[in-house]
Image (spheres, rainbow, N blue to C red):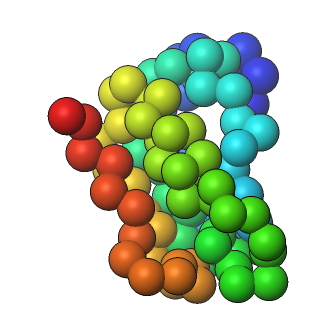
Amino acid sequence: MEHMKKLKMVDLNANALTGFDEVITEMTPNIRSLDLGHNQLFNQGVEDPNMEATFTAKLKEFKHLRKLVVQGNPFIGEPPDIKKQ
């Protein structure tokens, strides 16, 4: 997705993603809709104690994000809260 500054919608539904930390949000600053549903985010088999904090911080980098889909992922506990403070 490098240098796609006009990209507004990304659908990564059902891609077996286990993480999202490699996405460089500065290259895609205008994303408004992000579908990460039905992947393996927060899978218990992945041992990363900072997984939720990393994921939440990365999502907050999307300044124009209005729609986020994460249903169908094996979250441990509650899905992350990305509301801006």
Instruction: Mark yes or no: residue 13 visible.
Output: yes
Q: Position of residue 54 (x, y in %)?
A: 60, 47
In the rendered image, the quadrant that contains the C terminus is top left
User: Residue reaching furthest left?
Assistant: 85
Residue 19, quarter of the rendered image = bottom right
Q: Is residue 72 left or right of residue 68?
A: right
Write the residue at 71% across / 36% down. Answer: 23
Image location (x, y in percent) of residue 64: 34, 27
- In which quadrant of the rendered view does residue 25 lie? top right
| Quarter occupied by the N terminus | top right
Residue 58 in the image: above or below residue 63: below
Residue drawn at x 64%, y 55% as measured from the top left: 50
Residue located at (69% from left, 80% from top):
43
In the rendered view, does 21 fall on the left or right side of 29? right
Is 29 placed above or below 78 here?
above
Counting labels gives 0
Query: Residue at position x 70%, y 84% from top?
Result: 44
Residue 9 position, x and y percent, is: 49, 41
**From the viewer's perspective, is 62 left or right of 25?**
left
Left or right placement of residue 23 versus residue 9 in this view: right
Q: Who is closer to the viewer here, 50 or 29?
A: 50
Q: Is residue 65 above or below residue 12?
A: above
